[in-house]
């Protein structure tokens, strides 16, 4: 599987410089967290292709600070510099000069003074910047005003390049393979953990990165996952159980995010069929209308209309939304805008070819059970391309 080439990273950095200048910034800092999770890595990875695998450890004054993080300093009129805790990197190396910095915060302050004139500096990755580090930077950089600028990253990553779309397709294929492996393992007597292991093994074997999952079954299928660091339990599955899985991972950083629900070892009951049909049919209805020029809110309203007409809602009434009223989100290097809702800040956003959306719905009713359905879709000039569709047998 091909990776993003150096020329594309250079083009991304040039585009980010232009966005920064238009916003009145002297430059930007992309701050990312690495380690075992893919929660806040996208800013640095998008600009340089670098992921920091060192896990987070608490600061130790005089020895290290912000271990498990990385930063890119990008002046509007100068080259990018990557700051990381370890300057020794494997090939292919990052698309930027690299400097090792055990104390990442003070090294960042030093580089900002050297490379960016005093003034406003956009900070991408605000959620990964802890308060003590932010306060330290403000105290030692009185002439530089750090301003939250995550919207610049969302703008830059909103429409994917052809190379990115190929990675999204590869990720979708891998996600379906992993979910298929989970379904094949889900037989009566097998535990949730064993089902999860089948999915994870398929991802790792194919060279992908496992990110996480929510899995629940039977009497607990209305919950997202076990209340434990492991998102699966040792509960054995029984014939007739609902099994609900929301699974996410990546190929070279680009995510798949899909959810499926099925009945273990038996045909669905009438009540279970109503549950399964409601989530699947509503999501499919939204996918069918995805076209360039449509507003995000219109997609959400189409999903809602079909859901409200479902047999499940007819018999049980409208359940509370498990997603804050949203029917999905943008997808790429992270779960990101636009948020597919009928109202709110993204409802009026116009969909463009090259965007990738994950449309989803989760129902949770303790007396009935729980179900999820989610697909990843690339928007093309000719309509939706579902990258997580199961192969036709």
Image (cartoon, rainbow, N blue to C red):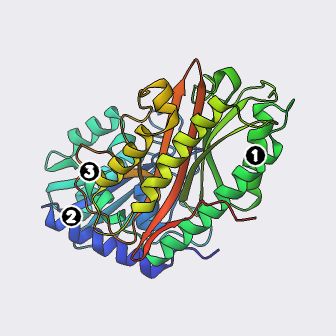
Pointer 2 or 1: first along the chain = 2
Camera-side residue: 231 or 142?
Answer: 231
Q: CA distance from mark 2 to mark 3?
A: 22 Å
Q: What residue sits right under mark 1 in the picture?
A: 182
Nearest-to-viewer mark from 2 and 1: 1
Q: What residue sits right under mark 2 in the picture?
A: 20
Q: What residue sits right under mark 3 in the picture?
A: 346
How packed mark 3 is, by other alpha carbons closer than 10 Å (few <14, some 14-19, many 20 or more), is some
Nearest-to-viewer mark from 2 and 3: 3
Q: Tell me if 4 is positioned left or right of 158 in this view.
A: right
> Relative to 345, does residue 21 appear above or below in the rendering?
below
Q: CA distance from mark 2 to mark 1?
A: 44 Å
- Spot occupied by residue 295 in the image (x, y as percentages of width and height): 27, 58
Q: CA distance from mark 1 to mark 3?
A: 34 Å
Pointer 2 or 3: first along the chain = 2
- Spot occupied by residue 18 in the image (x, y as percentages of width and height): 22, 71
SS category of the residue bearing label 1: helix
How packed mark 2 is, by other alpha carbons closer than 10 Å (few <14, some 14-19, many 20 or more), is many
How packed mark 1 is, by other alpha carbons closer than 10 Å (few <14, some 14-19, many 20 or more), is many
């Amino acid at each position: 599987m091909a990776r993003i080439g150096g020329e594309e990273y250079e083009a991304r950095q040039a585009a980010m410089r232009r966005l920064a200048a238009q916003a009145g910034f002297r430059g930007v800092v992309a701050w990312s967290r690495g380690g075992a999770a893919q929660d806040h890595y996208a800013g640095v990875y998008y600009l340089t292709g670098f992921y920091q695998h060192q896990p987070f450890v608490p600061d130790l004054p005089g020895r290290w600070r912000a271990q498990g993080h990385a930063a890119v300093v990008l002046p509007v009129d100068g080259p990018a510099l990557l700051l990381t805790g370890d300057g020794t990197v494997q090939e292919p190396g990052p698309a930027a000069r690299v400097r090792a910095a055990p104390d990442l915060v003070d090294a960042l302050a030093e580089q900002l003074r050297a490379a960016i004139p005093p003034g406003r500096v956009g900070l991408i990755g605000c959620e990964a910047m802890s308060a003590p580090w932010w306060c330290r930077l403000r105290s030692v950089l009185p002439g530089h005003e750090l301003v939250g600028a995550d919207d610049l990253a969302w703008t830059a990553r909103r429409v994917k390049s052809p190379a990115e779309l190929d990675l999204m397709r590869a990720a979708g294929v891998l996600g379906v393979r992993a979910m298929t492996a989970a379904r094949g393992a889900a037989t009566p007597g097998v535990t949730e953990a064993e089902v999860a292991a089948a999915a994870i093994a398929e991802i790792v074997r194919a060279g992908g990165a496992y990110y996480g999952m929510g899995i629940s079954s039977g009497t607990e299928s209305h919950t997202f996952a076990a209340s434990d660091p492991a998102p699966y339990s040792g509960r054995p599955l029984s014939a007739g159980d609902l099994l609900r899985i929301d699974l996410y991972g990546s190929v070279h950083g680009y995510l798949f995010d899909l959810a499926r629900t099925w009945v273990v070892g038996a045909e669905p009951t009438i009540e279970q069929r109503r549950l399964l049909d409601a989530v699947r049919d509503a999501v499919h209805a939204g996918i069918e209308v995805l076209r360039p020029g449509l507003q995000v809110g219109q997609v959400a309203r189409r999903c809602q209309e079909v859901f409200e007409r479902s047999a499940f809602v007819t018999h049980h009434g409208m359940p509370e939304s498990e997603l804050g009223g949203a029917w999905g989100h943008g997808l790429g290097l992270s779960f990101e805008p636009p948020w597919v809702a009928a109202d709110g800040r993204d409802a009026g956003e116009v969909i463009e070819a090259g965007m990738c959306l994950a449309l989803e719905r989760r129902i949770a009713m303790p007396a009935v059970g729980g179900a999820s359905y989610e697909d990843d879709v690339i928007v093309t000039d000719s309509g939706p391309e579902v990258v997580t569709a199961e192969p036709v047998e």
